[in-house]
Image (cartoon, rainbow, N blue to C red):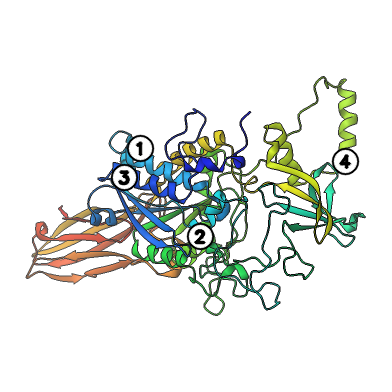
Amino acid sequence: MPAPFFWLPLLAGLVGPLQDDAAPTTPLLDHAALGTALAEIADSHPDQVTKSLVETSRGGRSIELLTIGTGETNERMARPGILIVAGTDGSHAYTSGIAVSQARALASGYGSDDAVTALLDTTTVYIVARMNPDACEGRFGAPLAVVRGTGHGIDNDRDGRNGEDDHADVNADGFITMMRVPDPTGQWISDPTNERAMVEADRDKGERGMWKLVTEGLDDDGDEEVAEDPVRDAEVNRNFAHDWNEHGAEAGLFPTDEPAVRGMCELMLRLPNVQLVLTYGQLDNLIGKPKSVKDNAPATHRVPPLGVMESDVKLIEQISKGYKTLTGDKCEGASKDGSGTFQTWAYTHRGVLTLNIDPWCIPLDAKEKAEEGDEGDGDEEEEEEEEKSKDAPKPSDDAKRLIWCDNEGEGARHLGWTEFDHPTLGAVEIGGFAPYALVEPPDAVRAKIEAKQQEFLLTLGAKLARIELKEAEARDLGGGLLEVTAALENDSFLPLFSRSGRRARTQRPARVLLELPVGATMLAGSRQTLVSELAGSGGRREFRWLVQGADASAISISVSTIHAGSSSVTPEVK
């Protein structure tokens, strides 16, 4: 059986497809290999793909943007846009492979794949394959550890020194895991259903804690605390302005202090045609229902209330139905906290509907395999077992994860608990789940995820708001008087603006303009009308003008938007 993924960080050096039908189309890519892959896509498809720099990270790594579409730059900007952002968190470096595989499929499929061609003829796709390159590079480091903080550090233990007590590979096994320390005041016990899993003791049930759990490390500063003052604290995806945690070490010195964050904010300003953001990271809003707030919920000190507005939740839920059916994804996200993240900033501050996907987590519904020869002895024994199970302790989520690991031959994802004589803590046990084991899928599963995410992406173009002028007519009322009418419609699923977009007012309204020939006079109606609201699925707005002294063939009615298309028509004489 091949070794589990986390034993093979050197796979990151590969760029081309692996020689295995079950392998992902894109292997794990470190920063250098990712840059090579993106350059190869752009160089191989210059008519469809443009590569540009978003920003350089604090660690000196480039964050790059692929623009995928047809025509010149102005034509691409005139079409509705979808922005894909992967690698938002250090724990999800593998999601960059999803974005790269999508870019390859779009670039190579144009002209030969009908669905791809239809998407790119009507939509511009922007891809940032790795928003957080400094943290994601931790996936390829040694010893292997999940890296989150890559920005400014603080004096966490308030001893006048900064970053002097970082994590450390104490037992030299190549992994930074956890240490369980015997302590009568500890909060943790072994799961009674599986001693490898740890659960918090419930004193109301008579459970007494036996262990403290701490990150593997030493007491470098002699304060009897272990690994409590890392070198770096600030996290890129906690440094965005919305719901920024002012006093949190992970939040950075001030919003947009991190270069990657400033770059992403400026990118959104440069791409006003982006109508939908799709992210791959540890946040989810397509499997679990997002926290909602009423559309008319008042702001507090001009700050919008936290949550997704009810009207937008309904849109997300409808998209979610198709997503679940297509992908079979059941992962509700490795994190529930969206404070200071790109996802919540893009939705709340920019008003762009944002779909967040955590593509995989260890399933919690795996059943323990029956022991060989254990057939049971009929209905009576089954009833007896069911009665016993009512009083039996229920496995924790970690115990359920271990069931899946054991069933799937992925037992090495958990390193077990090994006794170790710690230089300051004495007898401890080191182990637990290996870095990335809880969030990174096996190769065969990742290959399926890439394929399903590409299918899902191809369904999104048709959902974007696209407004169109219809039924433009000019009726002769006699005496040189014309009644001109037209209807503005949106036959797509999404509205012209999300409810959050209408609140943020960061995008220009649609402009409906009646243009008359020289000498003509408008007697009724408005020459220009700004439309800030138009529902999806057949949303309609009707216009009427009275015009004196104009030939109908010289009249033009136009609608222009930054993000939902533009068009003009000449009214038909009736």
Residue 166 percent coordinates (x, y):
66, 63
Mark 1 or mark 2: whose residue is earlier in sequence:
1
Residue 117, quarter of the rendered image: top left
Residue 115, quarter of the rendered image: top left
**Side (left or right) of 408 relative to 390:** left
User: Residue pushed farthest right?
Assistant: 206
**Side (left or right) of 240 relative to 212:** left
Residues at discs 3 and 1 in contact (Cβ within 8 Å): no
Q: What amino acid type is highlighted by mark number 2?
A: Gln
Kindly report the distance in space between the C-alpha atoms of the residues bearing marks 3 and 1. Answer: 9 Å
**Residue at label 2?**
343
Instruction: Give the mark toward the camera: 1 or 2.
Output: 2
Residue 390 percent coordinates (x, y):
87, 40
Which mark, by number, is residue 392? Answer: 4
Q: What amino acid type is highlighted by mark number 3?
A: Leu
**Secondary structure beneath label 3:** helix
Q: Residue at x 74, y 33 (%)?
A: 367
Kindly report the distance in space between the C-alpha atoms of the residues bearing marks 1 and 2. Answer: 27 Å
